[in-house]
C-alpha cells in the first residue's frame, strides 16, 4: 500500500511515479456530480440571500447563504481535483470548507427553535428561548476548533512522515466530529421535548389564541417540516463523517466516492434546498418581523452609544 501522506506532499501531478491511486482520495472526482453539487449550492446561496434581504431575515439568511456558498466553493475545489488529483490547494479547500459549512446551516436551525418557542409559549421551553443560539453556536464552534486542531496535527505530521502524530490528528478530528453529533443529538432532544410539551399545551383546555393559530398555520408547518428535514440530513452527514475518518487518511470509506457524493454531498444539498425553498420570510412572518425589529433595535442602540461617546469626548475637551 502506498504511503499516502508522504506521496501527497511530494507529488504535484499524475505520472507513473505519482499515480492517482496514491492520492488521499484515490480517484478522479466525478466531474458531473461535483458540478451538480456546486451549482446546486450556488443557486441555494443566491436564492436564500435574495429572499432573506427582501424579507429582512438577516441572521437566518446569513447562516444559510454563507453555508451554501462555502459548500459551493468546496465542490469547485473537487472539480479542480478532477483535472489534477494532486492539486494540494484544491484538496485542502474542499476538505476545510465542506467540513465547516454544515455548522453554519445548523445555526439557522437553532434560530428557528428560538423563534418557535418565543411565538408558541416561551414558558414551555426548559431553556430560555433566547439562549438557544448562545448555547449551541459556541458548541458548534468548539467542535470545529477540535477538528481544526486535528487537521493541523495531521498537516504537521504528514510531511515529517510522523505516523504517531498523524494518528493523534486523525483521532482528534474524529473526536470533534463525534462531539458535533452529540451536540446535534442534544439539540434534537431539547427540540423534541419542547414540541411534546407544546402539543400537550395546545390540546389543553386553555391554549392562547395566538399559539393555537400558529400551531394550525399550514405555512408554518411546512417551514418546520423543512427545518426538521434539514436537521436529519445534517445529523446523517455528521455520522457518516465519523465512519469516513475512523480508518485514517486514505482509508477505504474515504476513497469510496459514491458514498461521499450521497452521504456528504446530497445529504447537505437536500437540506440546503429545503431551507432555501421554504424561507421563514414567507412561511413564518412572525420570525421575520422579530429578526427585522432586532436588527433595527441593535442598530439604534449602536447609534445611541456612538452619540454618547461623542458627547463624552466633547465634554472632556471643554473641561480642558
Image (cartoon, rainbow, N blue to C red):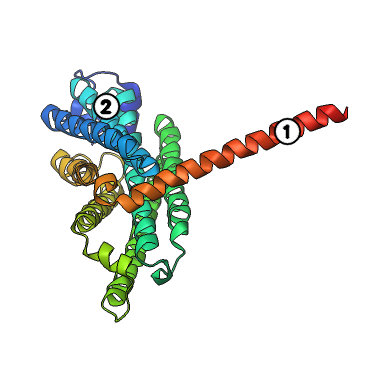
Q: Residue furthest left?
A: 32
Position in image of residue 180 (x %, y %): 37, 53
Give percent across and percent down for residue 303.
59, 36
Q: Secondary structure at mark 2?
A: helix
Q: Is residue 313 left or right of residue 181?
A: right
What's the mark number on residue 149?
none
Q: Nearer the viewer, residue 64 or 9?
A: 64
302 shown above or below 175: above
Residue depicted at 16% across the width and 28% down the height: 35
- Proximity of marks 1 and 2: CB atoms separated by less than 8 Å: no
Percent x, y for residue 4? 29, 33
Q: Which mark is residue 311?
A: 1
Disc 1 is placed on an element classified as: helix
Q: Position of residue 54 (x, y in %)?
A: 31, 35
Quarter of image, res 116:
bottom left
In the rendered view, would you say 30 is above or below 201? Answer: above
Asked if 119 appears above or below 201 in the picture, the reply is above
Dot 2: within a 10 Å radius of its alpha carbon, few (fewer than 14), some, or many (20 or more) residues? many
Instruction: Please tell me which of labels 1 and 2 falls first in the chain.
Output: 2
Crowding around mark 1 (Cα neighbors within 10 Å: few <14, some 14 to 19, many 20+) is few
Q: Is residue 118 above or below residue 284?
A: below
- The residue pinned by badge 2 equals 77
Amino acid at each position: 500500500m502506498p504511503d499516502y501522506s508522504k506521496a501527497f506532499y511530494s507529488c504535484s501531478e499524475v505520472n507513473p511515479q505519482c499515480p492517482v491511486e496514491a492520492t488521499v482520495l484515490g480517484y478522479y472526482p466525478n466531474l458531473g456530480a461535483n458540478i451538480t453539487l456546486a451549482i446546486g449550492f450556488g443557486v441555494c446561496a443566491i436564492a436564500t440571500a435574495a429572499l432573506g434581504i427582501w424579507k429582512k431575515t438577516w441572521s437566518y439568511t446569513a447562516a444559510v447563504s454563507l453555508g451554501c456558498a462555502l459548500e459551493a466553493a468546496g465542490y469547485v475545489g473537487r472539480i479542480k481535483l478532477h483535472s489534477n488529483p494532486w492539486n494540494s490547494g484544491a484538496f485542502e479547500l474542499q476538505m476545510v470548507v465542506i467540513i465547516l459549512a454544515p455548522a453554519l446551516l445548523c445555526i439557522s436551525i437553532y434560530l428557528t427553535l428560538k423563534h418557535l418557542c418565543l411565538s408558541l409559549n416561551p414558558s414551555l421551553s426548559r431553556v430560555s428561548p433566547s439562549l438557544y443560539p448562545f448555547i449551541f453556536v459556541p458548541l458548534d464552534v468548539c467542535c470545529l476548533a477540535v477538528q481544526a486542531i486535528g487537521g493541523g496535527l495531521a498537516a504537521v505530521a504528514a510531511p515529517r512522515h510522523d505516523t504517531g502524530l498523524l494518528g493523534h490528528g486523525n483521532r482528534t478530528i474524529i473526536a470533534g466530529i463525534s462531539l458535533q453529533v452529540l451536540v446535534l443529538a442534544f439539540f434534537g432532544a431539547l427540540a423534541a421535548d419542547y414540541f411534546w410539551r407544546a402539543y400537550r399545551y395546545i390540546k389543553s383546555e386553555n391554549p392562547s389564541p395566538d399559539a393555537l393559530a400558529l400551531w394550525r398555520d399550514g405555512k408554518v408547518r411546512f417551514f418546520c417540516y423543512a427545518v426538521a428535514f434539514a436537521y436529519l440530513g445534517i445529523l446523517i452527514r455528521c455520522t457518516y463523517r465519523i465512519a469516513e475518518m475512523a480508518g485514517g487518511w486514505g482509508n477505504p470509506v474515504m476513497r469510496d466516492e459514491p458514498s461521499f457524493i450521497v452521504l456528504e454531498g446530497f445529504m447537505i444539498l437536500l437540506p440546503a434546498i429545503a431551507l432555501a425553498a421554504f424561507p421563514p420570510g414567507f412561511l413564518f412572518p412572525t420570525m421575520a418581523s422579530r429578526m427585522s425589529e432586532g436588527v433595527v433595535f441593535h442598530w439604534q442602540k449602536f447609534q445611541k452609544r456612538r452619540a454618547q461617546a461623542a458627547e463624552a469626548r466633547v465634554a472632556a475637551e471643554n473641561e480642558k
